[in-house]
Amino acid sequence: MMKSMTGYGRGECTAKGARINVELNSVNRKQAEVSLSVPAELESIESDLRDLILASVSRGRVSGRVVLQYTGASRASAVAVNETQAKAYRRELSKLAKSLEIPDNLSLDSLLRLPGVLESAQPTLDAKAFRAPIKRALGQALEGLLSMREKEGGNLGRDLAKRLAKLRRIVKRVAKLAPDVLKHHRERLIERLKKANVDVPDMDDDRLLREIVYYTDRTDITEELTRLDSHFVQLEECLSDVVPVGRKLDFLAQEMFREINTIGSKANDANISSEVVTLKTELEKIREQVQNVE
């Protein structure tokens, strides 16, 4: 099924006294890119997380964030008293009290409030112990991300199918107009000869036949129409393909534009030129949509 390159997913789990949150979002990019923000103590498993994402995403820029939030119990146990600092404060303050001849009545509560006495003593994290729970949370986030990309991809596929049908209708009209181009050219040629007071040759005249053959060869758009039809078939196949098709669609859109442009240059006909303008307008909308496809 066709997928978009934009999406969002979130996962969460609890382990080792901490709540793990993983958020992922993706935007358009021609190649697959991953940018992760993880706590410094978990950097050793960042490459594993990156590989998991790249295994599921082939196109687009994925930005992710891993956050550890410690529970209340963890925070309570993660406090330590810097005894050396406390003793230094006590010693110096006693000296000061003696020097100023004032009571030395420093309380424990006051001592604990002094800078550096109470310290955050977050336990050293074991990255390996967090690998499995973080992968679970990442799996949830990836599932949400891919689900959104598939849903948006379905909308893109339906829109592309409608536009493809419109392109086919326009090309059919062009194919019907093509045979009249030669007839109109012959009529214009004879009319110009008459206006120039030149004897009009009959239809078997070699000069007239050579001119008609030359013009027919120069304005024949059969090959372009055939190639366009082939591109339409391939585009339609992409709409139901299970593998990423964004790059292929981008290539097909470029090729279709080339064929349509050639038709407009070769046909030299007002009616066909008008249809070519409509074709280009519709194809440009397809090219814009294709930029969103994985």
Image (cartoon, rainbow, N blue to C red):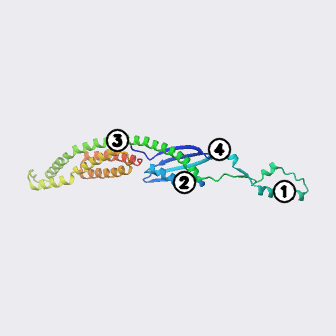
Q: Nearer the viewer, residue 131 or 222?
A: 131
N-term-proximal mark, 4 vs 3 = 4
The type of residue carrying mark 3 is Ala
Q: CA distance from mark 1 to mark 4?
A: 37 Å
* Number of numbered discs visible in the structure rendering: 4
Q: Name the mark nearer the viewer: 4 or 3.
A: 4
Q: Name the mark nearer the viewer: 2 or 3.
A: 2
Q: Secondary structure at mark 1?
A: helix
The type of residue carrying mark 2 is Ile
Residue 71 is marked as 4
Q: Nearer the viewer, residue 71 or 201?
A: 71
Q: Secondary structure at mark 3?
A: helix
N-term-proximal mark, 2 vs 3 = 2
Residue 167 position within the rendered picture, expressed as x and y whole percent measured from the top left: 30, 43
The type of residue carrying mark 4 is Thr
Q: Secondary structure at mark 4?
A: loop
Q: Are marks 3 and 1 in contact (CB under 8 Å)?
A: no
Q: Could you tell me if residue 269 is visible in this image?
A: yes
Residue 15 position within the rendered picture, expressed as x and y whole percent measured from the top left: 60, 45
Left or right of residue 228: residue 36? right
In percent of the image, x 18 and y 54: which residue is there? 217
N-term-proximal mark, 2 vs 4 = 2
Circle 1 residue: 93
In percent of the image, x 15 and y 54: which residue is there? 213
Residue 161 is marked as 3
Circle 2 residue: 45
The type of residue carrying mark 1 is Leu
Q: Name the mark nearer the viewer: 3 or 1.
A: 1
In percent of the image, x 35 and y 51: which residue is there? 248
